Amino acid sequence: MKLGYCGSSPQVRPSVIGVICATNAITARNLKWSAWGKPVSSAIGKAVVDLCAYTDCHTGRYGSVPIVVIASKIVMCGKRTHAYSDLQYVFVGRSPFRDIPANMKFSNFLFGSHRPSPGDQSVRLTC
């Protein structure tokens, strides 16, 4: 069983996951997995988050918060490789992005409107 994301090669029990592709807004680190290979696997770790990713402060300001990631929906990747295709993440305690409105538009920001909202908390994985 493998997990790949943001164009990375699929890995077994990755200890680091770039949760939001195309930005370094959220990176889950030091992940400790349980039930790996089962239909649903979860890991606990620390998220390094860019606290300026969804505001316009240009330089970036980073913090670390506890995170839980949940991998599910096993699919075939290639001829003999199974991989998780869905990833959900939850910050333990308060979200570092708690003050961002759920319907915020990013069209006038430095990186453009393609930024995913941190409120979604669900991403598709790639093989």
Image (cartoon, rainbow, N blue to C red):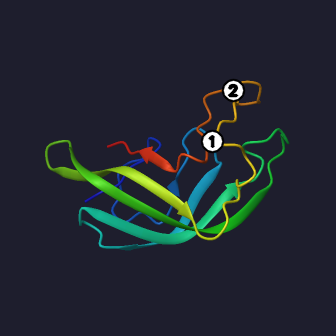
Camera-side residue: 127 or 98?
A: 98
For mark 2, give the secondary structure: loop
**In the rendering, at what x and y percent does residue 86 appear?**
36, 49
Q: Name the residue under label 2.
A: 112
Residue lying at 82% horizontally and 38% vertically, measured from the top left: 56
For mark 1, give the secondary structure: loop
Is 107 left, or right, of 9 in this rendering? right
**In the rendering, at what x and y percent does residue 57 appear?**
85, 42
Residue lying at 64% horizontally and 70% vertically, measured from the top left: 93
Is 118 left, or right, of 62 in this rendering? left
| Cα gap from disc 1 to disc 2, whole angstroms | 11 Å
Is 78 left, or right, of 20 in this rendering? left
**In the rendering, at what x and y percent does residue 85 appear?**
32, 48
**In the rendering, at what x and y percent does residue 51 appear?**
75, 53
Residue lying at 54% horizontally and 46% vertically, measured from the top left: 120
Image quarter of the C terminus: top left
Residue lying at 25% horizontally and 60% vertically, measured from the top left: 1
Camera-side residue: 89 or 7?
A: 89
Q: How many marks?
A: 2
Is 93 left, or right, of 100 in this rendering? left
Q: Residue type at mark 2?
A: Gly
Q: Residue type at mark 1?
A: Thr
Q: Residues within 10 Å of mark 2 (few under 14, many from 20)?
A: few
The quarter holding residue 37 reads bottom left
Q: Mark 1 points at which residue?
A: 23
The quarter holding residue 54 reads top right
